[in-house]
Image: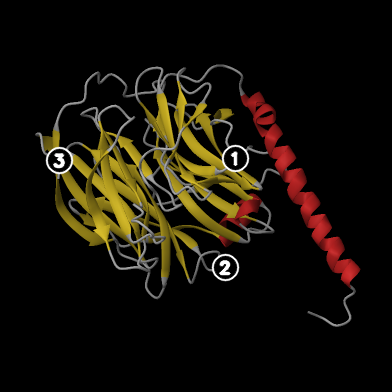
Amino acid sequence: MGAGRPPVRRTGKLVALACIIALASAAAAEALRWSGGVQRAEQPAVAGTTVTAPTPITINEVSRSIIPMPAGVPSAHASALAALPRGDLLSFWWAGSRESGPDVKVYASRWSNGTWSNNWVVASRESLGKALGFGVRRIGNPVAWTAPDGTVHLYVVATGLGGWAASRIVQMHSRDDGATFTVRRVLPLSPLFNTSTLVRTSAVPLADGGWWLPVYFEIGNKYPMLMSFDAGGEPRRIGRIGSGTSSLQPAIVPVSATEVRAWMRDAGEGQRVQQALSRDGGNSWEDLAPSQLSNQSTSLAALRLSSGNFLMLYNHVAAGGSDRNVLSLALSTDARTWRPLADIVSGKPGDEFSYPTMQQVGDQLHITYTHQRQAIAHHLLRITPGKEPL
């Protein structure tokens, strides 16, 4: 602390910061009404809700591996998966010297014929800043979605001044299976300088060829939101999920043509999977009591299989535990009650296996997650009819 700096100036800065945070929270409360002007029509119907009764399945692990990482880059985190039209997969993640480091880039690798390709760079703060016409200080979580026409849409968190609470979401797209990406826009999500919105979890297909993108707000109050896009990737509607102010990173799964479930990371002290329910196809949401599943305040993944069953990957919290060293898989037949199946990976205290994502391709289930904050791990599992999963 400099001796020549008077306390009144320091206090003034704190007051100014408090005012900014208060303004941010107030503006956040108005974000739904402001951004709802994108389109007032009801949400389009979700896709893949024709399965009426889940059928018994068996899940067996086939292989596990580490996706090829960029040489000399010590930190990696926050993977995402996107299926390509002919059965291949793309994995995206950020990597660099550390989280928020100026050298962080978004990388990709392609799964084809049972192996992962060498990685390549798809976005950096320099490339985004050049395309957008203004400086980008840091980049973070990617989320990807392949549209029915084969276009791969990539959403990347990027900040200017400030930390993650000052983030924006940059939408990019690729028409060559992810080899190259073009910046399309910064998503219009918040009236507060369009900041403090982030992405983490997988998109959800809609019956008309569009999709839902789960997003969340993270300055002051924290809450989940849902943005819809048409088949061409144009944003058309955004809505808040529930009315709570302490959950984020929503994982969205349709249960029927009208029922949609959301499970969130708990930003409070409860260490439980938070829940919300829509009874009208995603147009309105109500908060539910926390799930019986514990979760160590971190991102989780949820997926509805083609068999009709539901899977969730989460960081199980043992009694008295506070680490991300156990990544557990649970199954549900109704999206209400969950049965733990197995630990996908576990380690000693201080280890980290976190931020999972899942993708089903035929009878294969692909799982990726952060491995010790140093790499992205991949597990391949096979789903077959049966009565004893795992």
Q: Which residue is mark 1?
A: 245
Q: Classify mark 1: helix, strand or loop.
A: loop
Q: Tell me the CA gap for discs 3 and 1.
A: 36 Å
From the top left corner, tell me how far across and down residue 180 is, in percent: 43, 51
Q: Classify mark 2: helix, strand or loop.
A: loop
CB within 8 Å, label 2 to label 1: no
How packed is label 3: few (under 14 Cα within 10 Å), some, or many (20 or more)? some
From the top left corner, tell me how far across and down residue 296 is, in percent: 42, 53
Residue 389's disc number: 3
Q: Quadrant of residue 238?
A: top right
Q: Residue at x 65, y 52 (%)?
A: 166
First-in-chain label (3 vs 1): 1
- Can residue 191 be seen here? The reply is no
Decide if residue 76 is on the left or right side of residue 124: left
Q: Classify mark 3: helix, strand or loop.
A: loop
First-in-chain label (2 vs 1): 2
Q: Which residue is mark 2?
A: 102
- Can residue 378 be seen here? The reply is yes
From the top left corner, tell me how far across and down residue 24 is, in percent: 72, 45
